[in-house]
Image (cartoon, helix red, strand yellow):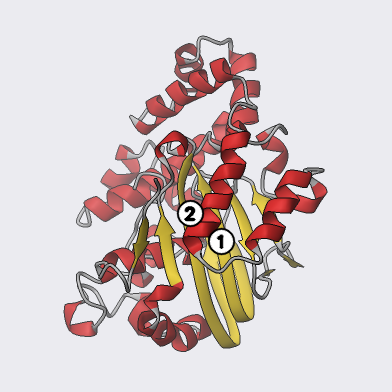
Amino acid sequence: MPYAIDAKAFSLNPMDVCRAYAHLKGLRPTIRSMPNKSECRRHRKCPFFTMRTNLFSVLLSNFLQKMDSFQVIQPAAALSQYVKNYWFMTVHSEEQASERVIPTGMMSLVFHRGERIFASSDNQWQPRAFLGGQDSTYGDLSYRGTIDMISVEFRPAGAKAFFKLPMNELFEQTVAIDSLNDPQLVELENRLSDVADPMTCVYLIERFLEKRLYLSDAYNQKRINAVMQAIYCGQQNIDKLAQTACLGYKQFKRIFADYIGANPKDYLRVVRFQKALHTMHIQPDISLVQLAFDCGYYDQAHFNKEFKQFCGYTPTEYMTVCEPYSDFFS
C-alpha cells in the first residue's frame, strides 16, 4: 500500500514540506524547523522570505496557511523501482506568477486539472496532460489562477517500463498524451479529472501502471539499472559504463538513450550538475575550486559555465538565492 505524507494531517516537518514544494518550483528553501525568520538558517538568502518575485509575494502565505494543498505520496512496493513518488499540488495566484525549473535527470507524467502553465522559454502553453522528457537546460514557467497539478515522478530508467516509444524521442519535449496514440492514457486523464481525493488518484494511476509494467525488455532494463547504480556511485566514464552493461560502445549508447531519454554524454553532464548541488548541500563550506575537482570538471571556469547552463546562475549567484539541493541524489 502506498502511503501519503500530508502536511496538515500528519504534522509534517515544515522543512520537508518546503523542500517538496521547492522541488516543483526549482528552488531550495533553508528553513530548519518552522517557517519563520527566527528559525531560518539563512533567511536573508532564502527565497521564501526575500519575496523578490510575484510568485512568493502572492503564493507563499497562501501555501503555508494551506499546506493540505500539497501532498507527496510514495509508490507501492511493486512500482518503487520505477516510480520515485507522486506529487499533488494546488496553489492559487491572482497575479501573474513565474518560476524556474532545472534539469533533474528524471522524467515525469503530468496532469494539469486547473489553469495551464505557460513555458516562457519555449513560448508555448504546456499541454493539459503530458509526458515530460529529459531536459538539458533550465526553463521558465508562468501562470495565473488556480494550479491543480498531479505529477508522476519516474526514476531515471523508470518511464521506459510503461511506454513503448523510445524515451530519447521525448528529449527536451513535453509531449501531450493525446498525441501518443494511447487510449488507456487518455482514459486515465479523464478519470483523474473527476477525482478529488489524492489516494484515489494514486490508486487509478497505479492500476494503470501495473497493467503496463512488462512492456519493456526485462533484460535490457536490468542492464540499465546496473548502469544507473554505477552512475550513482560516481562512475562517469562511458566506456566503463558500457562494460557494466556488457555491451559494445555503439549498442550501449543506443539502449541507454532508449531507456534514459538522453545520450550518455548529455545525461552524465546533468548528473554531474546534480552532484554539484548535492555536494554544495551537504558540504556548505567547500571551496568552489575543490567542488569543481570533486565533481569531475576540468577547472572552475568549466564548472561555472556548465552550472549556469543548467540553472541560469553561476554557483556563487545560486547560493545567494537558495540552498542547493539535489533531486537526483536525494
The picture quadrant where one finds residue 37 is bottom left
248 or 23, nearer to the observer = 23
Please indicate whether residue 318 sits to the left or right of residue 103 in the image: left
Q: Is residue 9 above or below residue 102?
A: below
For marks 2 and 1, the one nearer the N-term is: 2
90 or 30, nearer to the observer = 90
Residue 150, numbered label: 1
In this view of the protein, can residue 153 be seen by the observer?
A: yes
For image coordinates 31% across by 75% down, the residue present is 45
Q: Which residue is mark 2?
A: 86
Specify few, some or many for label 2: CA neighbours under 10 Å numbering under 14, 14-19, or 20 or more.
many
Q: Is residue 75 above or below residue 100?
A: above
Q: Is residue 272 above or below residue 118?
A: above
Element carrying mark 1 = strand
The picture quadrant where one finds residue 6 is bottom left
Query: Real-space Cα distance between discs 2 and 1?
Result: 7 Å
Q: Is residue 40 above or below residue 124?
A: below
For image coordinates 48% across by 54% down, the residue present is 86
In this view of the protein, can residue 308 be seen by the observer?
A: no
Element carrying mark 2 = strand
Specify few, some or many for label 1: CA neighbours under 10 Å numbering under 14, 14-19, or 20 or more.
many
